[in-house]
Image (cartoon, grey):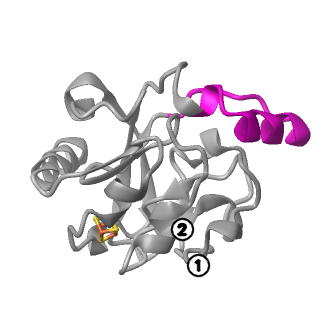
Amino acid sequence: MPIDPEFPKNHKVIGMHRHADREHFHFVWGPGKEDGESSTDENVQNAYKERGEQYVPLGVHGTFVALDWDSCIADGGCIEVCPVQVYQWYRTENDVPAVQMINATSAGTGEDHQKEGRKDYTDKSEPIREHDCIWCMACVSVCPTQAIKVDQANQKIHQEMKEKLAK
Ligand code: SF4
């Protein structure tokens, strides 16, 4: 099941992943889904077993560059194709279970250029520089599971949620 195009309506903000620059962050939307592509992907499931980590629903990271981590199978095409390095492999900076990234802080120093930069197939592409997107849509086109929705109009939702949560 690809990313729900209406995820801001059908999900709630469950976390805020901050950039260490203290200026930027992206929201995390949940709950995650049980039946995402990663739940049946052999590479992903084997990697979880090898690590001894529990597989759990994770939700959508980002709002105007949104990546459904339950659909993400760690292909990495988005990481290679993005001309402005919006994405990084989250585990190369924070090697922890993905569920712990819901309210994490990252400096953006992770591997962000190669598919092979993934630690293993439990890794996920994280839109750590969501704010740098230039709307080229290359990542959307290349994703094999349609896990990504890029929508300039969702900047308004990001701003509204930011103001709401600041109150
Ligand atoms: S739309 Fe283009 S610039 Fe934006 S995250 Fe995707 S590949 Fe990067």
Q: Closer to the camera, 32 or 161? A: 32
Give coordinates of residue 3: x percent, y percent.
Answer: 36, 35
**Horizontal side of residue 83 vs 162, given as left or right:** right
Give coordinates of residue 100: x percent, y percent.
Answer: 63, 44
Tell me the number on the disc at residue 109.
1
Q: Residue at x 45, y 54 (%)?
A: 17
Q: Closer to the camera, 44 or 14? A: 44
- Residue numbers of the magenta segment: 38-58
Where disc 2 sits, the SS reads: strand
**Horizontal side of residue 94 vs 138, given as left or right:** right
Q: Tell me if mark 1 has few (under 14), some (14-19) or many (20+) residues whose alpha carbon lies within 10 angstroms of its own.
A: few
Q: Residue at x 22, y 74 (%)?
A: 134
The quadrant holding residue 95 is bottom right
Identity, as a three-letter code, of the amino acid under mark 2:
Gln
19 up-or-down from 161: above or below: below
Q: Residue at x 52, y 74 (%)?
A: 108
Q: Answer yes or no: do the residues labelled 2 and 1 have beta carbons within 8 Å?
A: yes
Of the two numbered discs 2 and 1 in the rendering, the one whose residue sits closer to the viewer: 2
Q: Name the residue carrying label 2.
A: 88
Q: Is residue 49 magenta?
A: yes
**Horizontal side of residue 109 vs 160, given as left or right:** right
- How many discs mark residues in the rendered view? 2
Give coordinates of residue 150: x percent, y percent.
Answer: 25, 54
Which mark sits nearer the N-terminus, 2 or 1?
Answer: 2
Q: Tell me if mark 2 has few (under 14), some (14-19) or many (20+) residues whose alpha carbon lies within 10 angstroms of its own.
A: many
